[in-house]
Image: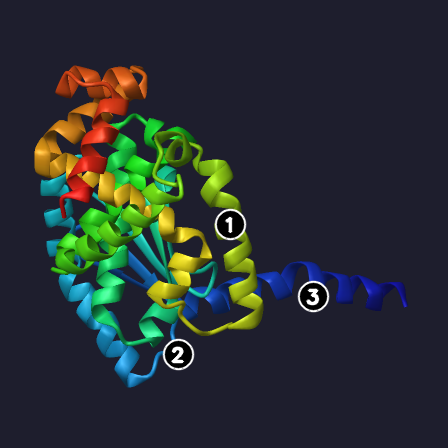
Amino acid sequence: MKNICLRIGFIVSVLFPLIYSLACQVSTKTIKTGYYELSTGSGWNEDEKKIIEEIIANLDNLREKVNEMLENELPPKLKLVITDEGMGSTAIREEEKILLNAVHVRNLNLKDCLNRIAHETAHIALFRMSKRKIIEWENKFLDEGVALYAGYHYVGELEELNALSNKIAMEDFKNGKASLAYLRDWEKNVREKQRQFAEKWRTENSGKTPTLDNFITGGYRTYFTSYSFVKVFMDKYSLSQLQRAIRNIGEGKSQSEAFKMVTGKNLSELISEWHSSLSNV
Ligand SMILES: [Zn+2]
């Protein structure tokens, strides 16, 4: 009896995990491009395989474009994992890794996949450029604003992004959600709403991709307001001045000092410029 128990114990504790991990390795494919190491599961249908092939064909060009845009801050290698975990896409900045939810591949929308990969790739560059400080809550509106720009710019849909973010930012100015205090209080004003949205979406709509409208009503509208600030700043000053402000933040300057060093104006003056330029649209 004792012997049988020992054998069962051996199978459960040693053999089963070993076989399981081997099986997982077999079903995960890793493909290397010049800059990316892409891991994806198997079990894709023919149309999905085609989308993955097109993603692979575009990856190195995408990386070069984002790298050019963000002053060559990207590391030489990035990991990309297409996974069923989480929702949407995420950058794990410390590991230089991007997760893209498989639902976007199943949706067969190549531009959406590339937009997301460029967006998350930009987050990794900004993280390095700011010496990690861009992920502090008060800087998140800059992080997301620039990442949205990178993603939409890469897929050639900036016009759509500009129109949408103008509209959202104007509404937000009316209801106080485009104030600097609101944008900088990202943890309180955005993060919790996103968490609730993701949880609700997963339980009620599993397997479906949220539409842009779903995202906007579900806690992501601040992303577009943030982009609106970034866009107006880039139009009046430049992307490279914005990058210099982000580098100044990385050197330990306060957000206000960082912008003043670059533009000679404090943040509330920049916010007023933003507001009046929106009113003139
Ligand atoms: Zn983002």
First in sequence: mark 3 vs mark 2? 3
Mark positioned earlier in the residue sequence (2 or 1):
2
Tell me the number on the disc at residue 141: none
The circle drawn on residue 193 is: 1
Q: Secondary structure at mark 3?
A: helix
Residue at the (19%, 56%) spot, across then down:
163
Q: Is residue 89 visible?
A: yes
Q: Residue at x 45, y 65 (%)?
A: 84
Work out which quarter of the rendered image holds the N terminus and state it. Answer: bottom right
**Ligand 1 within 8 A of label 2's CB?**
no
Mark 2, mark 1: which one is toward the viewer? 1
Mark 3 to mark 2 CA distance (whole Å) = 28 Å
For label 2, the crowd category at 10 Å Cα-Cα, with few meaning under 14, some 14 to 19 and many 20 or more, is few
Residue 139 % position (x, y): 35, 31
| Image position of 222 (left or right of 128) | right
Tag 3–tag 2 contact (CB < 8 Å):
no
Q: Are marks 2 and 1 in contact (CB under 8 Å)?
A: no
Q: Is residue 71 visible?
A: no
Instruction: Tell me the residue that label 3 is attached to.
Output: 11
